Amino acid sequence: MTSQHFDIKPIAGRIGAKIIGVDLSSNLSNEIISDIRKALVKHKVIFFRDQNLDAQGQVAFARRFGEVTTAHPTVPSLPENPEVLDLNYGKTVSRANTWHTDVTFVDRPPLGSILRALVIPPSGGDTIWANSVSAYEDLPTHLRNLADKLWAVHSNAYDYAAATIDLPQEVLEHRAVFTSTIYETLHPVVRVHPESGERGLFIGGFVRRLRGLSQNESDEIVKLLQAYITRPENTVRWRWKVGDVAFWLFPLFRPLAIIT
């Protein structure tokens, strides 16, 4: 797509684009917001360099795309801005070096997420996003037909007998907060995006099992499907700079990992 209001520079072949010529702290017109939304739906994750957003500006920008939720169902947000979560890796949250999803364990996941960069390490800290629509399209027909019929149970509960071995104390404390209220919900493994009509895999780190299958069967099938999502051709990697803003589409497209 193109826009008369800003430039769109695709980054990877199947996902990701940089938006050039937009000041997110300004009073953007409805036409610009509409074009940003179209770019988001097409490219799944979009990036803005050299922005000057504070927490209030981030929330104000997010509100242009719909109702804003609290930052997280269980993890405390900024006291003065309940819509914003402080992701201070190594202090407030643990690093995530595996493919993960955000809050698929709730009944109604949000439209998207917006992340702004305040402090960047001298090396590392890149984030990778994955396109679950192109992953679904890559599936052989028989696997696609299977995925279309599956439902998955998502939960924020951990198997602490297996998950607490050799973990730092701060990680254990974060997990205790994260699971202070247990959520569990059922979602189809394949969902249709309401705007694009695209079908994508809806799985990830919070899938606990597949309905009607044993735990071993569930684990193997989910592992197989996720292997398509994490193929390099379905990902885009972003090297952060201070002032960057990333906006990714939910619930079909989400971060792959934070590389440290």
Image (cartoon, rainbow, N blue to C red):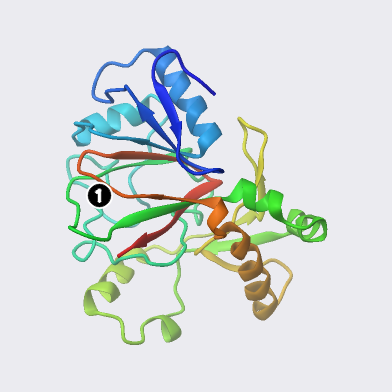
Foreground residue among 198 and 167: 198
Foreground residue among 77 and 257: 257
- Where is residue 62 drawn, in percent x and y? 35, 31
Give left or right: position of 30 versus 56.
right
- Where is residue 187 drawn, in percent x and y? 62, 54
Foreground residue among 229 and 53: 229
What residue is at 49 percent from the left and 44 percent from the top? 12
Hey, which quadrant is residue 70 in on the image?
Answer: top left
* Quarter in which the C terminus is drawn: bottom left
Above or below, comparing residue 137 to residue 258 in the picture: above
The residue labelled by disc 1 is 77
Element class at badge 1? loop
- Where is residue 240 drawn, in percent x and y? 28, 47
- Where is residue 222 drawn, in percent x and y? 63, 67
Give left or right: position of 126 versus 45.
left
What residue is at 31 percent from the left and 86 percent from the top? 166
Give left or right: position of 90 versus 61.
left
What residue is at 31 percent from the left and 50 percent from the top? 239
